Amino acid sequence: MKEPILDIGCGKDANLVRLLRMNGFQAYGMDRSVETTEYTTKANWFEFSLRPNDWGTVFSHMAFSNHFGHHLLRKDGDYRAYMLKFIEILQSLKVGGTFIFSPPIPFLEEAMENDSNYRVVRYEEQTAAVTRLRG
């Protein structure tokens, strides 16, 4: 994993962040239910601005995919805002950085297959990873 690492929607206990840090990784988490510490931020990840070229790896287990899917299926859902957040997350990656999310969002991955700036990989239909290849 390329560092630094960000866990979007890390949960109140930030378990993945703590595990990664215990193993020497530069890892951080963000969630509206986590207490702010030196490596966690209490914030709504959807409203938090990510700087370009900042992260080596971004994780989102359930947070991004579930919220996106929810808004995509609702008649009054704001799926465009989630598309923009997806683009912001990808742009926040350093070259060689990866956004790993679960569950996958098949139409997003398929739409990116011909984009030479990114490589999309799916793992056992449970997780998707988008790696930034170019700046």
Image (cartoon, grey):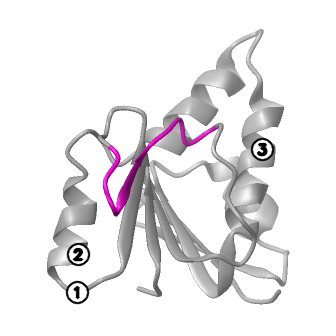
Mark linked to residue 83: 3
78, above or below 127, in the image: above
**Which residue is at a point 31% across and 54% down the rendered structure image?**
37
Kind of residue indicated by mark 3: Met
Looking at the rendered image, the quarter that the N terminus falls into is bottom left
How far is mark 3 from mark 2, CA to CA? 30 Å
How far is mark 3 from mark 1, CA to CA? 33 Å
**Which residue is at a point 72% across and 65% down the rendered structure image?**
51
Give the quadrant of residue 29: bottom left
**Which residue is at a point 22% across and 86% down the rendered structure image?**
24
Q: Position of residue 33 (x, y in %)?
A: 33, 32
Looking at the rendered image, the quarter that the C terminus falls into is bottom right
103, above or below 43, in the image: below
Q: Seen in the image, is 130 located left or right of residue 29?
A: right
Q: Kindly identify which residue carries mark 2.
A: 21
Callout 2: few (<14), some (14-19), or many (20+) C-alpha neighbours within 10 Å? some
Is 91 covered by the magenta stretch? no
- 3 or 2: mark nearer the eye: 2
Kind of residue indicated by mark 1: Gly
Q: Kindly identify which residue carries mark 1.
A: 24
Which region of the structure is painted magenta? 36-46
- Do the residues under discs 2 and 1 have CB atoms within 8 angstroms? yes
Give the quadrant of residue 120: bottom right
Q: Is residue 126 visible?
A: no
Tell which circle, 3 or 2, labels the residue nearer the N-terminal end.
2
Q: Position of residue 72 (x, y in %)?
A: 70, 26
